[in-house]
Amino acid sequence: MREISIRRHFEYLREYSGINFHTHQLRHTFATLMLEGGCDIFSLSKMMGHSDIKTTTIYLAASTVHLQRQMEKHPLNDF
């Protein structure tokens, strides 16, 4: 698909669904859901086409619940 046809496709989806969203928001949502689903950041970086992991971190917005669950996994949490 060419960029122009992808843009038209998303314009149609916005109009049809009545939801105002942007493709960049979809990238943020994808990255966050993948991270919260257990995907490692290296793999996520490759999936998003980034050559530098630092770029991938810009897209991550982990929820408070996810962060709390990750902290509960720490080995010292059992003490």
Image (cartoon, rainbow, N blue to C red):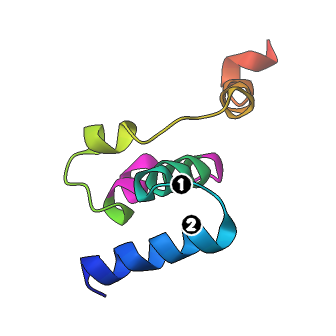
Residue 17 vs 62, above or below: the answer is below
Looking at the image, the residue that sits furthest to the top is 79
> 28 or 14: nearer the eye?
14
> Horizontal and vertical percent for residue 35?
56, 48
Q: Is residue 31 left or right of residue 57?
A: right
Q: Secondary structure at mark 2?
A: helix
Q: How many marks?
A: 2
Report, in whole angstroms, how far the alpha carbon at label 1 lies from the one at label 2. Answer: 7 Å
Residue 66 vs 32, above or below: the answer is above
x 59%, y 35%: residue: 62
> 9 or 56: nearer the eye?
9
Q: Secondary structure at mark 1?
A: loop
> Residue 2: which disc?
none
Residue behind mark 1: 21
Q: Amino acid at mark 1?
A: Phe
Callout 1: 10 Å neighbours few (<14), some, many (20+)? few
x 55%, y 51%: residue: 29
Q: Is residue 74 left or right of residue 72?
A: left
Q: Amino acid at mark 2?
A: Arg
> Horizontal and vertical percent for residue 50?
25, 55
Callout 2: 10 Å neighbours few (<14), some, many (20+)? some
Looking at the image, the residue that sits furthest to the right is 78
Residue behind mark 2: 14
Residue 67: say if magenta.
no
Q: Which residues are magenta?
A: 36-45
x 41%, y 52%: residue: 24
Q: Is residue 56 left or right of residue 75?
A: left
Q: Looking at the image, do the residues carrying marks 1 and 2 touch, with CB atoms under 8 Å apart?
A: yes
> Horizontal and vertical percent for residue 9?
45, 79
What is the magenta segment's predominant secondary structure? helix
Mark 1 or mark 2, earlier in chain: 2
- The quadrant of the image that shows the N terminus is bottom left
